[in-house]
Amino acid sequence: MSITISAATARIARQLPEAELSLDSALLASARLMESMLLARQADGIATFTGQTALMRLAKTQRTLLESQNDMIRVHQELLGIGRDINAIADEPEACPDRAQLVDDAAMLRSA
């Protein structure tokens, strides 16, 4: 199956923001879950450290989602470069992520 460059560009332009937003949605959902878990262990009769392992795993999941967001920004930048190279898109710098916004994953995780 083959599609035209303009059709592929339109599909990617529609699907890329959806993918980016899905990562935001997942991070928000996990943050709400974290809040609920912390509130639940404040209930009477619950030991202070109940669910600590689950909280640690959820925090790891959140870090992974943040790393995935950085990777998605890189995907966006790469696709933007390809689109420019093949003259499939107009140059709209304000519509796309800036490299300066990326955080060095390794340095950030060490400090967390």
Image (cartoon, rainbow, N blue to C red):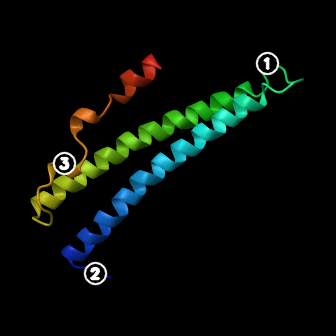
What amino acid is found at the position of numbered circle 1 in the picture? Thr
For the residues labelled 3 and 1, say whether their Cβ atoms are less than 8 Å apart: no
Image: 40 above or below 19: above
Q: Position of residue 59 (x, y in %)?
A: 58, 31
**How far apart in space, not on screen, are marks 2 and 1 (Cα)?**
59 Å
**How far apart in space, not on screen, are marks 3 and 1 (Cα)?**
47 Å
Residue positioned 64% across, 32% down in the render: 57
Q: Earlier in the sequence, mark 3 or mark 2?
A: 2
Question: Of helix, strand and loop, which one carries label 3?
Answer: helix
Q: Earlier in the sequence, mark 3 or mark 1?
A: 1
Please name the residue that numbered disc 2 is placed on.
2
Q: Is residue 64 left or right of residue 46?
A: left
Residue positioned 30% across, 65% down in the render: 12
Q: Is residue 97 left or right of residue 93?
A: right
Q: Quadrant of the N terminus?
A: bottom left
Question: Of helix, strand and loop, which one carries label 2?
Answer: loop
Q: Position of residue 56 (x, y in %)?
A: 64, 27
Please name the residue that numbered disc 3 is placed on.
94
Q: Position of residue 101 (x, y in %)?
A: 27, 34
**How far apart in space, not on screen, are marks 3 and 2 (Cα)?**
31 Å
Q: Residues within 10 Å of mark 1 (few under 14, many from 20)?
A: few
Residue positioned 56% across, 37% down in the render: 61
Q: Nearer the viewer, mark 3 or mark 2?
A: 3
Question: Of helix, strand and loop, which one carries label 1?
Answer: loop
Q: Residues within 10 Å of mark 2 (few under 14, many from 20)?
A: few
Q: Position of residue 102 (x, y in %)?
A: 30, 34
Q: Which mark is residue 48?
A: 1
What amino acid is found at the position of numbered circle 3 in the picture? Glu
For the residues labelled 3 and 2, say whether their Cβ atoms are less than 8 Å apart: no
Q: Which mark is residue 78?
A: none
Considering depth in this image, is 40 or 69 the residue closer to the camera? Answer: 40
Q: Earlier in the sequence, mark 2 or mark 1?
A: 2
